[in-house]
Every structure is written in structure tokens, then in C-alpha cells.
Amino acid sequence: MKQEKIDEIPKKKSNIFGLLKPYKKSIITLLILTITSSALGLIIPKIIARAIDAYTQKQFIIYDFVLEFGIIMILIFIFTYIQNIFQIYTSEKVAKDLREKITDKVSRQDYLFIEKITPAKLLTNLTSDIDSIKLFISQAIVSLVSSVIIVI
């Protein structure tokens, strides 16, 4: 009887974006920070190009160049720093919530289910799978958005 119950458990198809729906605001904030820091990084070549043009025309004023360059560098540092903190916070929050959901589901299962799934597979789901999701949130999303912005 117990064996039939185990086989009746429906298999859900899930994807990474489905897991991130509850964290939509955090992901959007992370994307905005990424876009801002990437866009600021694209201003630096324009500043350098203007400085080269001004130098060749004998109108180069080093104070203006250093001030403009310094302000952009400080803004890039601030936005990148905030982005990194927010990345870590969001990824840890998602990982914690996923671990709690998995632990809650496992704790409601009977012994035969645990034996069929195997403790090793459960441990894998609680550690490496969630760490992979955490890594995706903390690095892949930001890298993808940054790459798209630089290409555009």
C-alpha cells in the first residue's frame, strides 16, 4: 500500500525562472543596479576619447579630465559595491527559502519515500543543487545583463 502512494506523487517540471518569481522585486533591483554600473563603465571610453581629442587640439585641461574621470570611477565603485552586496543578499535569501521548502517537504514524507529517494539524493538537493541556483543568481544573471549591455 505504501509503495503505491510513493508512485502516485506527481512530478513537477520546474525551471530556474519559476523559482525566482517570488523574488521578482529583488531581481529587478539587481538588474537595475547591474545596468547602471555597466552603463557608467561605458562612459569611461568616451571621457578618454574626449581627452585625446582635446590634447590633440591643444585644449587639454588635466583638472577637468581627472575630476570627470574620478567622479565616474567613484560612481562605478558605489554602484558595483551595492550590486555585489545585493547579489549576495538575494542569492542567500533564495537558497535559504529553497532549503526550508525542501526540508519541509521531506519532513512530511514517510520512511519508504525517503528510502526510495535515498538520503544521498536528498542531501544533494539540499546542498549542491541549491548552491547551483545560488550561484546562478549571484553571478549568471549579472554577467548576462552586463554582456548584453556591452554588446548593445
Image (spheres, helix red, strand yellow):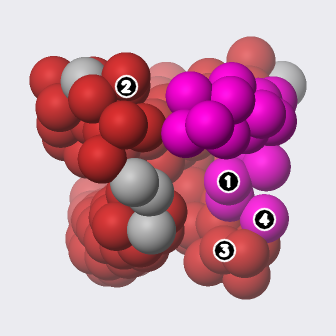
Q: Is residue 93 among what the camera can see? A: yes
Instruction: Please check the rendered image and state whether residue 38 is part of the magenta-colored stretch, yes or no.
Output: no
Query: Which mark, residue 23?
Result: 3
Front-lying residue, 1 or 51: 1
User: Could you give the CA–CA distance between mark 1 and mark 2, rounded to whole angstroms?
Assistant: 22 Å
Front-lying residue, 115 or 43: 115
Nearer-N-terminus badge (2/4): 4
In the image, what residue type sits under mark 2?
Ile
Q: Where is residue 43 in the image (x, y as percent from the top left)?
A: 58, 48
Residue shown at the point (55%, 39%) measured from the top left: 2
Proximity of marks 4 and 1: CB atoms separated by less than 8 Å:
yes
**Quarter of the rendering containing residue 139:** top left
Q: Position of residue 58 (x, y in %)?
A: 46, 39
User: Could you give the CA–CA distance between mark 2 and mark 4, rounded to whole angstroms?
Assistant: 27 Å
Residue matched to label 1: 19
Front-lying residue, 69 or 16: 16
Q: How crowded is mark 4: few (under 14 residues within 10 Å), some or many (20 or more)?
A: few
**Quarter of the rendering containing residue 114:** top left
Query: Which mark, residue 21?
Result: 4
Residue shown at the point (67%, 53%) measured from the top left: 19
Proximity of marks 3 and 4: CB atoms separated by less than 8 Å:
yes
Nearer-N-terminus badge (1/2): 1
Residue reaching furthest front? 1
* Vertical side of 71 occupied by 18: above or below: above
Q: Position of residue 33 (x, y in %)?
A: 57, 68
User: Could you give the CA–CA distance between mark 4 and mark 1, rounded to whole angstroms?
Assistant: 6 Å
Residue shown at the point (30%, 47%) measured from the top left: 111
Query: Which mark, residue 117?
Result: 2
Start-end of magenta stretch: 1-21
In the image, what residue type sits under mark 1?
Leu
**Dot 4: element:** helix
User: Could you give the CA–CA distance between mark 1 and mark 3, rounded to whole angstroms?
Assistant: 8 Å
